[in-house]
Each structure stands twice: as structure tokens, then as C-alpha cells.
Amino acid sequence: MKCSKLTVVTAAAVAVELTGLSLFVFGFFPIKPALSGLSGPESYHPPSSEEDVQFQLQNHHLKSLYHKLSQIPPSYDRLILMLYVSGVQAEFVLGNTPPLKDAMPYTQSLLASKMALAYHAKAAPPTVTLPRLKAITTGSIAGFLDVLFNFNTQALLEDNIIGQFFRIGWKMVMLGDETWLKLFPGLFTRHDGVSSFFVKDTVQVDHNVSRHLSYELYKDDWNLLILHYLGLDHVGHLGGHTSVMMGPKLQEMDDIIKQIHLSIIHSQESDHRRTLLVVVSDHGMQENGNHGGSSYEETDSLALFIGPGISNVSATYDTINQVDITPTLALLFGIPSPKNSAGYLIADLFNPLQDHQLLRAMELNSWQLLRLLQAQATYGSLDSLYLDAAALHGSWKSENVSRPASTDDLKSTVLAYNEFLRTASYQLSSRATDKPIGLLSLGIMAMLLSCVMFLGLLFKLGQDIYPNHKFQLSEALVGCVIVIIVLSMGSSSLVEEEQYLWHFLTSTFFLILLIKSTTGHQLFLNVVILISGRILKGWHQGGVNWTHLPDISKSLEISGSAYIKLLQIISILLVTSLCLYILSSLWSRGSIVILVGLSYLCTGLLVLQYIIMYQGSEAGNDAVQLIYGFIITSVTVTVIASPWFMFLQSKDLVLVIKDSLYLSGTTYMFGWCLLQHLLQQPVNSMVISLLLVQVIATIYYASHGGSNVKQWVEIAAIYYLGMAGHFSLGNTNTLATIDVAGAFIGISSHSTVLSGVIMFVITYASPMLALLSMVMSVSVKETHSFLKIDEKNTGQLVKMILGFPCLVPLGLNSVLLVAYTIILLVMRNHLFIWSVFSPKYIYVVVMSVCVIVGVLIVASTVTYIISASVSQRKKKPAA
């Protein structure tokens, strides 16, 4: 097979894989379907009515019409919706754990005196801001892929409570997270939005809200005031919920609640306006401050209600669903519930109502859920529950006409309605979205075809390079690792704790290589790899179930920042020294090598200066941007110029290509590692150094093994090191471990594109390091393609030395992608489909993109260097 044909088939396989992946992703994770249109006066009529109720009224008539049809007087005149614990779990406020509870004395006094109602509001995964705001305002469970749109919010077209308030003529003011302005453009009379993603800001984001508060509380020209504070969420991302900043920030928020509550009391006394304060959080957080998954800490959000007439009659704090807030507010303020609201009312808030008004509220809520059930063709299973409640309600009304109905009859009716509402809401919220099996099957078939193409190309290339070859134990183990990983994917527990498999299998793989070592040099390198791997395994207790266990990173954090900074300094010096040592074999090749060495020495010193002087402060932005520029310029100039400068030192084409590849590979690896020292959490600096040591040791182990270590085995070994290293950096298969704070290092203002790129670089640091190392790998491997270079054209040369470094990562990743795609389809009705399997699949998808990008970089670099070197030789033939 010629190089051109191999390239075309490989590109076709990548295109087919991406096409199949797109079909499957948008079939399995569609935007959650919503009923079109808006709720209106028809909401106050039973859905079973055959009458087509038409109302031709202007907007300013809607308010009085709704109040007449609902038969329930609005309980309040104004609403203050305060999201102040964005990212802080309800347990911080409602629990009994000091010192966080003690940081909010005024709020605690309201709860103790039973002047407020508080709940644990369960948020559905993914626990990030955008899906949770949609749940609070629409009452519906957001689609899983809304987590991706969290970084590029669009206007909310689905019926929502903000739009319902706007249609009855309410004036609304919004202060805080600019996500509200993107969701509801043009609906706010006044607003002051701030970016929610610049997580290093823990002060200004809250000051921008509070500076307007006294003015807005004094004004009487608004009906709805939204206050979305971000400081606590940012404190969590930066230091976890045990951060020293957490207590003072909670105290600050407690003072704001006190200010608002006193204003509510004054307003009621002076002009008899009844204002309801609703304090909610959109999600909780893990111990490290991150969120996005489905653990109790992440889904435990707060719902606190403060206002006239509210009395907490329970000593315990019950649990509600976050979607229950929407229908509750709609019924309290006399507007229709949004069309897709799947929540049910919080009954304690309706205690001040008369009996017939309470039952009317439950009836209206039941009609709303009935419409959704009928639209989704699931009403039949709940038919008897609704009919029982409706019959009891009808009987109660009939008895009440002639004489007051008994308390037992009222309780029976309320219990019947509660049973229907709770069951219907649960079924609507948990029901999986219908998936087009045909489209999903087509996507899987395309990915399967791509996988077969990759494996077929690998088999053909293996026959060309290693004819009549018999498999050895280490080579067979390459396939065994993938088989074991594939088999483990069907278990939710093993998906959550995948890191243990990668560490164990990688260690086993290198233990086999240790046994097969033929020289003392190989033995030493293998021991270095195994010892480094053992340290990396103990660095983070990753996964979900065992994060509380002690590990190296926790010990370092307990020891203090001074020890962590010392390790950072040692790690940077180690990387810089290793870079200069690797380059030392090329000192005789001229000034370009010396310049490259000096550039990385300067870059290492700049990173060192940043860590010592600026790390964690805004003052270092200029320094970080300078380092970005240094690394990008050094890598680009070195790769482009290396074949031209090398040819000036030697006319030996083999030597020029090998040295150019060696220099470019060194540049990629060490530039990437210094960049990671800048971006990764400080406690992970030594992890980067150890990963680099493992990769370099593997490359030299293979280079000293001659024909005993096949190139495809070496590439597979490096790929496995990259996967194990991914978890050594603290990554897991939950979205909560994504380092959001690191994505803004060196960025003075929010940029979705730049932040997204940096987040990708941080998350996939280890796999990309493994892929970039392929350039150095091909330069030190003594393959027959180099030895017989004069007998082959450029295309064949590229195929022989680049085939395995491209096809092995693509093939291995393709096997994992296809296997997990099939497992995801099989598990589509599993209890943990959205909390475990789906987040893992997002990582698998992005890993596929990572592999394709890495292979593209390697392929283009090697092709360019060979082409440039051959071109130079043609211009200046050897003497």
C-alpha cells in the first residue's frame, strides 16, 4: 500500500468516525423536547375538556383575568429571587456543622424563630449553572447536553416563569450573573450583569450586585428583583468549601439577607406591600469546590423562603426537587405554570390559604402535569391516581355546599392529590428522552466501520514491516489491556473507578517488559517507570467512592503551601535540567540547538519566577501571557527551522531527518510540560515531571531494545502511560473534576474560546504529552526505514516511520469509542445513565478529538521535516 493510499484511507476512516460520532451524540443527547407555545388562560381549565377556549385580550388584561380564573388571590405583590449560594450545598446553611453554619447568624435566627421555610432542593445532574437556571425558571429537567451550552448561553425559547411575569406587565430588575441576560434578553427594566466564568474574582462579582441593592430596595417601580451572587461559587472553585474565604463570604451574604428582610418588614408596615424573598442555590459542590456530577454534595442545593405569612412548622428540613420551585411561585403569584413544568407545589407555603383555595391550587397543578403526561403518552399509568383525587375533590365540594366538610375529608383529598402530584412529577422528571434507534444504529455502524478500517490498516502495515512475525507475550498484552478495559465499561462502579484499572494494567504491562529486559540499561529504565507509576498511583485517590482516603496530594495540602511550592520549584528544575540533558546529544549540531536550549532555560526560569512571585494573583497575567508567547514561538520556530539548520551541519539525509525529529520532539514535550506547570493545580506539578520521566524512559527503553521491541508495542505503551497519567492528575469520569479556575490563568477578561482551549489543555495534559512524544519516538527508533532511506521515495519513507505512531493511537481509541458507544446504548435505561455513563461518554468523545488532534500534529510535523529535508538534499546534493 502506497503512502498516498494509506493517507486517504486513514483520513476517510477519521471522517467516518467523526460522522458516526456526530450522529450518535445528537441522537442520544438531543436537546430535551419541549411543548411549544405558552401557558395562558386555558391552564385554568381541565385538559380533558373538549372545548377550545379562546381569549382575545391584551396583555394588560391578563393579570386580572388570571386572578379571576385561578380563584386563588395572589399571596404576594413582589418577589425577590436571590441566588446567593451558587455552588454551595444546603447543608452549609441547614446543617449543624460549624464554622460555616455559625457564619450566618441572622439566617439561623429566622429559621430558629420559625419565620422562614427552608428545604434541601435536589438538583438534577449535570450540576452546572445553565441547566439549573432552566430548571428553576421552567420547572423542567434540562437536557444533558445543556452542560455544553453552559459556556455559550442562548436565549431561552421555552415557556418560563420570567416570561409569564413579563406578559402580565411586571417590571423586572436583574443584578449579577449575566447568564440571566442571555437567557432572557430584553425582559429586564434595569440590569447589571457580570461574567460567571472568571472564577478568580471573588470580590468584584458580588460588589457589582450589592452596590445597587440599597437603591433598588428603596425603589417601588419593580415587581421582580433577581440577585445572582457568584462569589461563593468562585471561592469554592479556588479553595474548596474549606477555604478560609468561605466563612467571611457567607457572613457577607447573611448581612445581605438581613438587609433585604428588614426592607420587606418596612415595606409591609409602610404601604402594606407583601414581598416574598426566595433564596436558592443552583447546585452544590464537592469538597474540592468543583461540581457537575451527581453526588449528594453536588445535587444538594438550598431553597429558603422568607416573607409575611410564612411559618416553619417543622423542626426538620424536608427535601424537595428544584423543579418544584416553579409551579409553587406561579401559584403563589397567580400566573399560569410554564407549559413544561414537571414540579409539584410545596404545600407548606400554602398553609395561610383557605381549604378550598389549597385544593384549587392542587387541582391546577394536577391539570398542568396531566397535560404533560398526555403529550408524552404516559397518562394511562397514572389514570387511577388522578381520578381518585378528582373524585374526592368533587365529593368535598358537594359536601361543603350544604355544610362544612369534615377535616378527615379534606386530609383525604390532600393526600390523594399529593400522591398523584408526587408520582406524576417523578415520572416526568425521570423519564428518559425518546431516542431514535435508527439514527443511533447508523452512528454505531459508521464508528464500527471506521474501527475496522483502522485495525485493517494496522494489520496490513504490520505485515509489510514485520513479515512472518510471531506474537510475544508483551505484544499480546497490548490487546489484553484493551479487552479488560472494554469489559469493565459495562459496570457503573468500574466506570467511576476506572483509574485503578489503568494503573494496574499499565504496571502489569511494564512488569512483563521488565522480565523481558535484555540489558542493564533496559532494566534500569523499566524500574524507573514502575517506581514513577507507583508514586503516580498514590498521588490522587481519584474516582467517586474513595476520594476521602488519604493520598499524597492531601498530605501535601495539609503540610502547607510552602511544601507544595518547594515541590513545584524542584519539578520545574527537574524538567529544565532534563530538557538540557536530552539536547546535550545535539550540541555539536550548531547554534539552533544551543538557542533552543537557552529558550527553554529562559522559559523555565520565567515559569519559576511566576510561581514564586505571582501564582494565584491577578498581577501575574502579563507574566503568564509572556510565557505563552515564549512557548508558542519557541515550538513554532524550532519545528519550522530545524531541517534547514540541520542540513547546514550535515549532508547526510538520514542524520538530518533524525536530528530534526529529535529536536522537534524535544521541543514539543518540554514546551508542553512547562505549559502544564503554569496551568495545573500546584499540587500536580511533580505529577507532570514523573509523567515526562516515564515517557522518555519508555522511548529509550524501546530504542535500546532493537528489533526485540516492536514500534507498535512502544506506541501502545506510551498511549497507556498517557491514559494512566490522565487519572494521576486527579481527573475522573465525572464533570466535577474539570479545573474551571485554571482555564482563566493569563486571561484578563472572559473569552469562551480561549478558556475552552485552556480547559482542554489542562484536562487532557497527559494524553497529549504521550501523543506529542511520538515525534521523538520515531527519531530514536532504529528501524529499517531509516537504514534503507536511499532505496525509498519520500512517500514510502513517511509511511514506514509514521504509520504506527498514527494508526496505533487511532486504532486503540476507536476500539474504546465503539465499545463504550454500544454499552451506552445498551445502558440507556440504566438508573445511572445520566450520572455515570453519560459523563464518561463525554470524556470518551473529547478524548477521540484529543487523539485526532495529537495525531494530526505528529503527522504534519514528521511529514514537513522529511519533505523539507529531502527538498534541501535535492537542491544541494551530497558530494
Image (cartoon, rainbow, N blue to C red):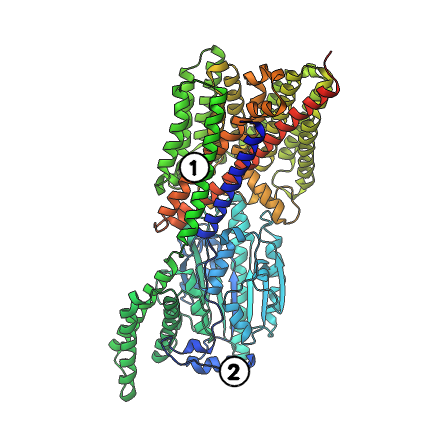
- Determine which quarter of the picture holds residue 650: top right
Report the quarter where the C terminus lies.
Answer: top right
Can you see residue 764? no
Q: Where does label 1 land, which residue?
A: 816
Q: Residue at x 69, y 28 (%)?
A: 640
Q: Residue at x 60, y 74 (%)?
A: 221
Along the line of sight, the residue nearer the viewer: 642 or 675: 642
Category of crowding for the residue at label 2, using alpha-carbon neighbours closer than 10 angstroms: few (below 14), some (14–19), many (at least 20): few
Height in image: 653 above or below 84? above
- Determine which quarter of the picture holds residue 824: top left
Q: Residue at x 59, y 74 (%)?
A: 220
Tell me, for residue 83, which label it has, or none. Answer: none
Whole-percent x and y of residue 101? 44, 54
- Determine which quarter of the picture holds residue 551: top left
Horizontal arrangement in the rendering, residue 261 relative to residue 359 (left or right): right
Whole-percent x and y of residue 793? 62, 22
Along the line of sight, the residue nearer the viewer: 682 or 745: 745
Q: Where does label 2 land, which residue?
A: 56
Task: Tell me the SS state at disc 2.
Answer: loop
Q: Residue at x 52, y 33 (%)?
A: 766
Along the line of sight, the residue nearer the viewer: 114 or 641: 641
Along the line of sight, the residue nearer the viewer: 358 or 863: 863
Height in image: 497 above or below 171? above
Can you see residue 280? yes
Q: Earlier in the sequence, mark 1 or mark 2?
A: 2
Task: Tell me the SS state at disc 1.
Answer: helix
Q: CA distance from mark 1 to mark 2?
A: 58 Å
Category of crowding for the residue at label 1, using alpha-carbon neighbours closer than 10 angstroms: few (below 14), some (14–19), many (at least 20): some
Horizontal arrangement in the rendering, residue 769 relative to residue 663 (left or right): left
Whole-percent x and y of residue 535? 45, 27
Height in image: 504 above or below 91? above
Check disc 1 and give the amino acid type. Answer: Leu
